[in-house]
């Protein structure tokens, strides 16, 4: 299974580099358009805050994307970091009988 060794980009970094910068939008102007505080958006673009479902809806409307884009980016980021920060989850034993295990494939983090 192919394991990713490089961490995925935080969705805030993608928002900053692929949307705000090309459109020459300041954090303040974008925050106003999104009806959120400048501080909230600043935390996101500086990768100190996660994209919530509500924020995904706001971003999707503002930048004509799907909310799934933003939630999938956040989920990928969160799962990668969870799988690399704590290894306690690796000690969990399967509760499924061996014949059932082929129906579910564990993701390769």
Image: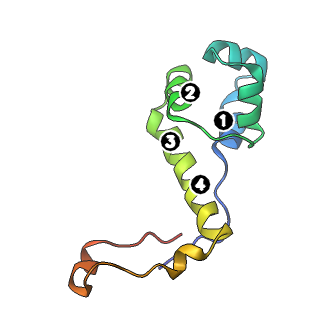
Work out whether residue 50 or residue 88 is closer to the camera in this orientation and state it: 88
Q: Which residue is mark 1?
A: 15
| Residue 66 located left or right of residue 8 | left
Badge 3 crowding class, 10 Å Cα cut-off, few under 14, some 14 to 19, many 20 or more, is: many
Helix, strand, or loop for circle 4? helix
Badge 1 crowding class, 10 Å Cα cut-off, few under 14, some 14 to 19, many 20 or more, is: some
Find the residue positioned furthest to the left: 99
**N-term mark: 2 or 4:** 2
Q: State the CA–CA distance, disc 4 to disc 1.
A: 16 Å
Q: Which mark is residue 59?
A: 2
Q: State the CA–CA distance, disc 2 to disc 4.
A: 19 Å
Residue shown at 64%/61% (left/top)? 81
| Residue 51 located left or right of residue 102 | right
Between label 3 and label 1, give the one nearer the viewer.
Answer: 3
Q: Which residue is mark 3?
A: 71
Residue 68 sits in quarter? top left
Contact (CB < 8 A) between labels 3 and 4? no
Q: State the CA–CA distance, disc 1 to disc 2.
A: 9 Å
Image coordinates for residue 66, horizontal then vertical, percent = 45, 33
Image coordinates for residue 12, horizontal then vertical, percent = 68, 39
Q: Which mark is residue 78?
A: 4
Residue shown at 68%/67% (left/top)? 85
Residue shown at 21%/85% (left/top)? 99
């Amino acid at each position: 299974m192919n394991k990713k060794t490089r961490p995925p980009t935080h969705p805030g970094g993608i928002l900053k580099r692929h949307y705000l910068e090309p459109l020459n939008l300041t954090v303040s102007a974008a925050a106003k358009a999104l009806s959120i505080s400048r501080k909230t958006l600043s935390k996101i673009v500086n990768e100190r805050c996660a994209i919530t479902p509500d924020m995904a809806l706001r971003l999707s409307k503002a930048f004509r994307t799907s909310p799934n884009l933003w939630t999938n980016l956040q989920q990928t980021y969160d799962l990668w970091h969870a799988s690399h920060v704590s290894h306690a989850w690796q000690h969990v034993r399967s509760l499924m009988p061996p014949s059932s295990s082929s129906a579910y494939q564990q993701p390769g983090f």
